[in-house]
Image: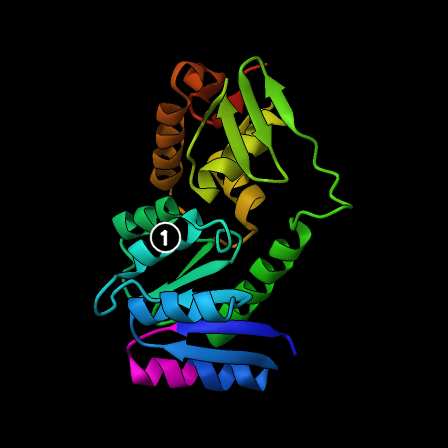
Amino acid sequence: MAGHILIVEDDANILELLRYNLTRKGFKVTSVSTGENALIEIGAHKPDCVLLDLMLPGIDGIKICELLKKGEGTKDIPIIMVTAKGEEDDIVKGLESGADDYVTKPFSIDVLLARIKTVLRRSKDVSPGPSAIAEPLRIHELFIDPVRHKVTLGDAPVELTLTEYKILYFLARNPGWVFTRYQIVEAVRGEGYIVTERSVDVLVFGLRKKLGNYEEYIETVRGIGYRFKE
């Protein structure tokens, strides 16, 4: 079995299309049509990946994503948003809520399958365990724990989305190196992710605000991108 996929989709035609193709590729597939039922299902049977529509009856996809990424037992579940909302603002909101990928409708089944395999592989690669080799980082009062995905300033925890955390850790472990916005996205999400320059800027802006006095450690390099201060 390739893995367990939960589809959260209220369009019966798209749901059947996804179920058929994923089942054919060896995935175990569960489906629900509302946000409330998604939370119940995930609480009872933790999936390996969630395909999440944004426009749902009841709790919408953004709220579902935020709740899952804040939950101790669910924050590491990969979430791919599969939605008709493809405007830049929608992509930014999806990134900010912690989604691991964002696919717009209409979509190619082959591309979606590739995206699913990528997030599943990445999830296994970063799973904490006895053999984890990622080293914690300390920059004065700022402490980053890559095993627990925790960030603290002094004794105070810094509440970051998963994407904000990944960007911070990526930059902090490469101090002085300048990265373009697209290099940052490829490093934290994998190649081929739909992104705009504005979405990266929004994420970095939010990250800086949460870092308070340490916001100056993430420097803007005009015309190129960002770097972590040496």
Q: Amino acid at mark 1?
A: Leu
Task: Identify which residue is drawn at 66% across, 29% down.
Answer: 136
- Taking 100 as reference, is 122 left or right? right
Q: Which residue is mark 1?
A: 67
Q: Is residue 148 above or below residue 208?
A: below
For residue 160, say whether it is visible.
yes
Relative image position of residue 79 (x, y in whole percent): 46, 59
Is residue 90 a member of the stretch shown in magenta? no
Image colouring: rainbow
Relative image position of residue 77 (x, y in whole percent): 51, 58
- Taking 122 as reference, is 214 left or right? left
Task: Identify which residue is drawn at 42% across, 71% down.
Answer: 41
Quarter of the image that includes the C terminus:
top right
Identify which residue, 107 or 68, lies in the foreground. Answer: 68
Identify which residue, 8 or 108, lies in the foreground. Answer: 8
Relative image position of residue 17 (x, y in whole percent): 41, 84
Question: Badge 1: how crowded within 10 Å, few (<14), some, or many (20+)?
Answer: some
Instruction: Name the magenta segment's main secondary structure.
Output: helix
Chain part drawn in magenta: 8-17
Identify which residue, 82 or 224, lies in the foreground. Answer: 82
Furthest-left residue in this view: 58
Q: Quadrant of residue 197?
A: top left
- Taking 124 as reference, is 41 left or right? left
